[in-house]
Image: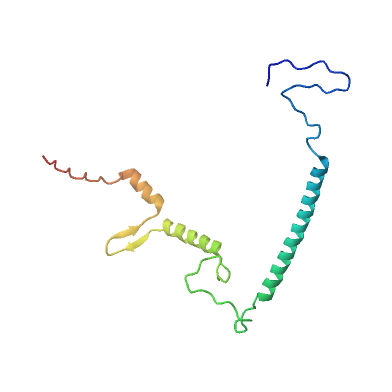
Amino acid sequence: MSTDPHNTGHGAGQEPTHDDVAFEPRDVKVSSVMKFLIYMGISIVAVYFICIGIYRTMTEERAASDVPPPAVRMGQPARMPPEPRLQGVPGHETDAQQDLRDKLAADNQDLAEAHWVDEKAGIAQIPVEDAMTIIAEKGLPGVAPAPAAKKKK
């Protein structure tokens, strides 16, 4: 940017002039922009049709190369993998949710009953509520502290 004064005295219809500033009255040609947009539109449509052609060709090729299963296995039930199988997969005989409900019910019933685990060793199982009452009355047995290690000098 120059600090020189520019020519402000111009007549009617004249453009202001300055030594450092050049003005091109036709910087952008509308015809070239329109040509570019038309060529781009034609290119997009052409690429679209090329992609559709490739897609159809690939689909037909895939359908032609798709081989049906061998006749030996047609009409036979699918073989199941060996046990143990995951619950809830197709072909599993039992309902996984019902199995869980049955297991929880059996565990709750087992925890609510008193019975011998090992009668010869004197190990019995009592209900949780009874065990909590006994511990609350008598407290937990004390644990002997670990022997202190000797310090090396």
Q: Position of residue 109 (x, y in %)?
A: 45, 59
Residue for point 35% across, 44% down: 136
- Closer-to-camera residue (93/102): 93
Instruction: Check the picture and name the quadrant holding the C terminus.
Output: top left
Residue at 38% over, 51% down: 130
Q: Answer with left or right where residue 105 lies relative to residue 151.
A: right
**Which residue is at a point 78% across and 47% down the rendered structure image?**
36
Pick the front one: 60 or 53: 53
- Furthest-left residue in this view: 153
Q: Quadrant of residue 112?
A: bottom left
Viewer-side residue, 29 vs 122? 29
- Report x, y in % for residue 50: 74, 62
Q: Which of the 4 image quadrants contains residue 115? A: bottom left
User: In the picture provided, is 113 more to the left or to the right than 20?
Assistant: left
Please provide percent x and percent y for residue 1: 68, 21
Left or right: 121 in relation to 37: left
Give the percent coordinates (x, y) of residue 107.
Answer: 45, 59
For the point 60% across and 81% down, the residue is 73
* Residue sitting nearer the eye, 29 or 67: 29
Q: Residue furthest right?
A: 12
The correct choice, above or below, for 1 with respect to 145 in the image is above
Q: How many marks?
A: 0
Q: Is residue 91 left or right of residue 8?
A: left
The correct choice, above or below, for 30 with respect to 105 in the image is above
